[in-house]
Amino acid sequence: MRRHVTTRLLLGSAATPLLALGLAVPAVADGPPAPAAPAVTLLPPLPLTLGDGAPCTAASERTASSGSWVRRTLGYSRAQELSRGAGVTVAVVDTGVGGAVPVLAGRVSALAGAGTDCVGHGSFLAGVIAAAPAEGSGVVGIAPAADVLAVSGTDDRGAWEAALVADGIRSAVDAGADVVCTGAALRSGRGVLTAAVRYATAHDVLVVAPAAPDLAADTRGDAPPPSGPYWPAAVPEVLAVVDFGPDGSRPAEAPDAYRPDLAAPGDQVVGVGPRGQGHWIGSGSSIAAATAAGAAALVRARHPTMPAAEVSRQLTEASYPADVPRLDPYAALATVLPEGRTAAAAPAAPVRMPAAADPQPGRRALVVAGAGLAVVLLVAGALAVVPLGRARKWVPQGRRLPGGR
């Protein structure tokens, strides 16, 4: 799997809890053009963690009725004509997934208490992946027919623990997940997380993770977090994803991504919470990872026998060309990549030049040609000079013209 050393896309302004519906978006359009004077809906920012003693995240009382910029930019309607993710299970190793999210109803199973979500982050990621269309709502997941497996990767406050994430990946694989998405981007836990990813790879399960940690809205402007590598995304077999926003840039305060494979929408994204029908707005590479994981579900549903490594290749190579390739779900579904394109190239056959020819015949030919040219020049000179001499009455040395001259 290729890794892109570039750490940052174009820089832009920081994400805010303000969603301007109908924003102009780059690349592919999906749906009607944005209105000239879009309405504005204020949505609460998605929490990443909860403080000690803080109550669980309540249901949002606000709803976004217009279509998301992500849906238009990635062309969901075109891609979903080819695949909706049916029959594929995506595990979300995060804060859990709420059992009272209407757009996920009937498609969520949970391991070891992950069926509740006090924080809301895992539920948000699950909605990005698999939220079904709902009347009066402009929010829909990229793979709205996929199933979700909720797995805990944090404590009940949303704090990440490498051991929990590693156990969650293994448990998801054992429970039959086809794709594993985690929002974790940790500076520690290399050993256990690498082993967990290798376990998933051995069972043909694709792991998708953020190439940079998320930054909470109330911490922007603080000292930046330590640079990567971040785990598990730094494991070579993981599809490492970085975020971009509606204008194609990342927030200026966003932590640098460490060697991402793919870029996907992740800033100013609207999604669901752990309960109710209201919406939240979130930003970060964990959301981009969820978007890519949903795209992987589309590919696995359309190509059930395609190995996990090839699914990753479809997403990274059938993409919009950029410094970090940008996700194109429709191209990933419709493109047939040549086999072995990413394999190491076979050594080229040595070029054999013909043996040098004997130089003697060529030299003899040059001598003969030179002599012939000299004769031609002498004859031509004689033909020009003799008539001129006769006209001027030239005579050879020692002879006199008649009359004694």
Image: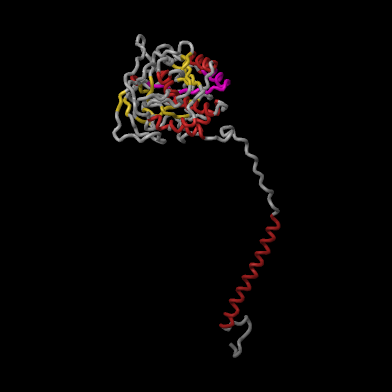
Does 214 appear in magenta?
yes
Question: Which residue, as the protein is rendered here, is positioned at the far front?
Answer: 135
> Which residue is painted at 54% across and 35% down in the image?
336
Q: Is 90 one of the magenta-colored residues? A: no
The answer to which of 227 and 35 lies nearer the viewer is 35
| Relative to 338, 259 lies left or right | left
The number of discs equals 0
Residue occupying image coordinates x 63% and y 84%:
399
Q: Residue furthest top?
A: 53
Indicate the quadrant where residue 263 lies. Answer: top left
> From the image, which quarter does the C terminus lie in?
bottom right
Q: Position of residue 118 (x, y in %)?
A: 39, 13
Q: Position of residue 76 (x, y in %)?
A: 43, 30
- Nearer to us in this view, 63 or 289: 63
The residue positioned 66% from the left and 64% from the top of the image is 369
**Residue 319 sits above or below residue 92 on the image:** below
Q: In the figure, is residue 247 to the left or right of 181?
A: left
Q: Which residues are magenta?
A: 193-215
Q: Position of residue 33 (x, y in %)?
A: 35, 36
Residue 363 location, x and y as percent? 68, 58
Picture quadrant of residue 250 = top left
Compared with 69, 232 (above or below) is: above
Q: Can see residue 147? A: yes
